[in-house]
Amino acid sequence: MRIARYVVGEDPTFGVVELAADGGEHPDTIRALTGDPLAGPVKYTGERVLLADARLVAPVIPRSKIVAIGKNYADHIKEMGGAETPANPITFFKPNTSVIGPGEPIVYPNATSHVDHEGELAVVIGRICRDVPRERVAEVIFGYTVANDVSARDLQKADVQWGRAKGYDTFCPLGPWIVTHLGVAEASDLDITVALEHADGSVEERQNGNTGQMLRGIEDLVVFVSSFCTLLPGDVILTGTPAGVGPIIAGDRVHVTISGIGTLSNPVVAQDA
């Protein structure tokens, strides 16, 4: 199942996306739901809208927190000048105000001169949990979506800690929807690619990796993060990025694709635009 949050008119609504590739009777439509599936039971309303007529927004209402993992792919550690795998996962928080949805602009702040894309698999938590044992990790995962851990690289180096560099408004695009039908094993073998579409129309592939290359897998990360903080429904764990990160500038459009989930696309605009 693909759970999307969309707008037709004024207020965002949750719904189930049915694609033509599924071979169903209602291709490329959204079947509306009552309420938020991460907050409690929902039902179908009986309404359907064409996917083309809806504006998708972030599929998660960012009530609480985004916990991100750094240096979780060996090739990315090397490209960033590192040599060794950290003894423990490196964690940092992105504020919920950094979340945007598909098609919404990434705003390039005036305070930085070097902003990078980082395509990542995002794990969406579905229930309140703490100290999750490995054998129960699948029970607390609601689903998976695509993320872009946008990073002001010069500020990251200058500040040493990463909060400002990765916490700007618009620096956590999520979408296009949450996929709930993937198991942990399936989500641990998905291709991640990032392509940059430049203002002149040319397209450059930047990242090409697989979630199977993570140094710490999904189960390891949920166990570790839940060992020091309570996770709430709608919390998101960003699982790290493969090699190939690179700069973006105003006028670019970033396309992050994860096989089995979909593509998250966002334009880049200058703060003063």
Image: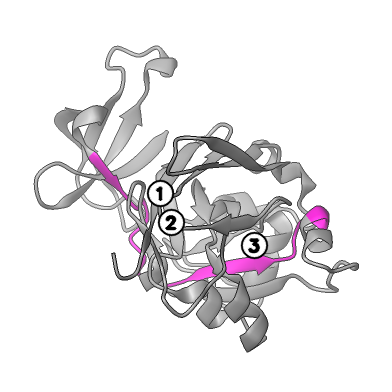
Q: Which residues are drawn in magenta?
A: 55-75
Circle 3 SS class: helix
Residue 58 lies, in percent from the top left, at 35, 53
Q: Residue at x 48, y 58 (%)?
A: 249
Circle 1 SS class: strand
Q: Quadrant of the C terminus?
A: bottom left
Q: Mark 3 to mark 2: distance in Å? A: 21 Å
Residue 269 lies, in percent from the top left, at 36, 59
What's the amino acid at mark 1?
Asn
In the rendered image, residue 70 lying in the magenta stretch gets the answer yes
Q: Is residue 212 above or below residue 36?
A: above
In the rendered image, residue 117 lying in the magenta stretch gets the answer no
Q: In which quarter of the image is the N terminus?
A: top left
Residues under numbered marks 2 and 1 in contact, where contact means CB atoms less than 8 Å apart? yes
> Which numbered disc, 3 or 2, marks the residue that appears first in the sequence?
2
Q: Is residue 217 above or below residue 264?
A: below
Q: Which residue is drawn at 35% across and 56% down?
A: 105
Residue 256 visible within the image:
yes
Q: Name the residue under label 1.
A: 266
Q: Is residue 143 above or below residue 132?
A: above
What's the amino acid at mark 3?
Val
Residue 174 lies, in percent from the top left, at 43, 53
Q: Mark 2 to mark 1: distance in Å? A: 8 Å
Q: Which of 97 and 205 is in front in this view?
A: 205
Q: Mark 1 to mark 3: distance in Å? A: 28 Å
